[in-house]
Structure formats: C-alpha cells, structure tokens
Image: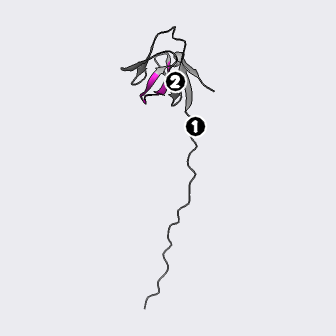
Amino acid sequence: SPTRTPTPTATLTPTPSPTPTFAPRLGVIAGTGGRRVRLRAEPGGDILALLPEGTIVIVLGEAVEREGLLWIPVRDISGREGWVSADYVEMGR
C-alpha cells in the first residue's frame, strides 16, 4: 500500500489591527459673527443644513483643501454628517 505523507495545514498568524490615525474630537461652530455656517455634502458641495454659532460638532477626520479653502468633516448632534469650512470650527481639547 502507498505511504501517505501528511499534508501541511495553513496556520493563521494574527495580524495587528491598524491603529487609527485620527480620533474624533469635539468642536464648536465659532467666529461666524452670529451667522450660520453651511453644512455641505462634500467640500464646496450642496448645502445640507445651516449650523448656528455655538453648535457642538464631532470632528470626524482631517481637514481637506479644496479650491484654496480648508474643509473639515463633522457630525452635528442630530446625526447629520457633512463638511464645514475650517475657518468656523474651534477645536475642543
């Protein structure tokens, strides 16, 4: 009878999960002179909502430059997500 050679079986080596490079932080809409800031679908895109000065937002990522302006991805307390001009977001600690 033929001799059987054991077939090697693959073993799974755990790989570490990548460490997130950005931790969400709180910010507040500020410096508007009492006007509302446009929450946009994308940097410079369609307006989703108007956020009054003093609105607390969660900053979801790094600022992105589009056409000479810096935009920050945020979520408001109603759960709406979009982009606002970085000029009007004061970062929390």
Q: In front: 19, or 81? A: 81
Residue at 56% from the left image edge and 28% from the top image edge: 26
- Residue 51 position within the rendered picture, expressed as x and y whole percent measured from the top left: 45, 18
For the stretch drawn in magenta, the main secondary structure is strand
Residue found at x 43% / y 22%: 43
Query: Which numbered tag is attached to residue 21?
Result: 1
Q: Do the residues labelled 2 and 1 touch (CB within 8 Å)?
A: no
| Residue that protrudes farthest toward the bottom in the picture | 1
Residue nearest the viewer, comparing 16 with 40: 40
Closest to the observer, 3 or 67: 67
User: Quick one: 50 or 22, which is closer to the camera?
Assistant: 50
Mark identifier at residue 9: none
- Across and down, in percent, residue 71 comes to 49, 21
Q: In which quarter of the image is residue 82?
A: top left
Instruction: Name the residue type under label 1.
Output: Thr
Q: Residues within 10 Å of mark 1 (few under 14, many from 20)?
A: few
Figure check: 2 above or below 76: below
Q: Quadrant of the C terminus?
A: top right
Report crowding for label 2: few under 14, some 14 to 19, many 20 or more residues within 10 A (C-alpha). many
Per the image, the residue denoted by label 2 is: 56
Q: Which of marks 2 and 1 is nearer the N terminus?
A: 1
> Which quarter of the rendered picture does the N terminus lie within?
bottom left
Task: Please state the extent of the stretch shown in magenta in the rendering.
Answer: 70-83
Res. 89 image quadrant = top right
Q: Could you tell me which secondary element the residue under label 2 belongs to?
A: strand
x 59%, y 23%: residue: 91
Instruction: Give the distance between the C-alpha atoms of the residues marked 2 and 1, in whole angstroms.
Output: 22 Å
* Residue 45 visible in rendering: no
Residue 78 appears in view:
yes
Q: Position of residue 25 (x, y in %)?
A: 57, 30
Q: In this view, does 3 lie above or below 54?
A: below
Report the residue at 43% width, 30% height from top: 79
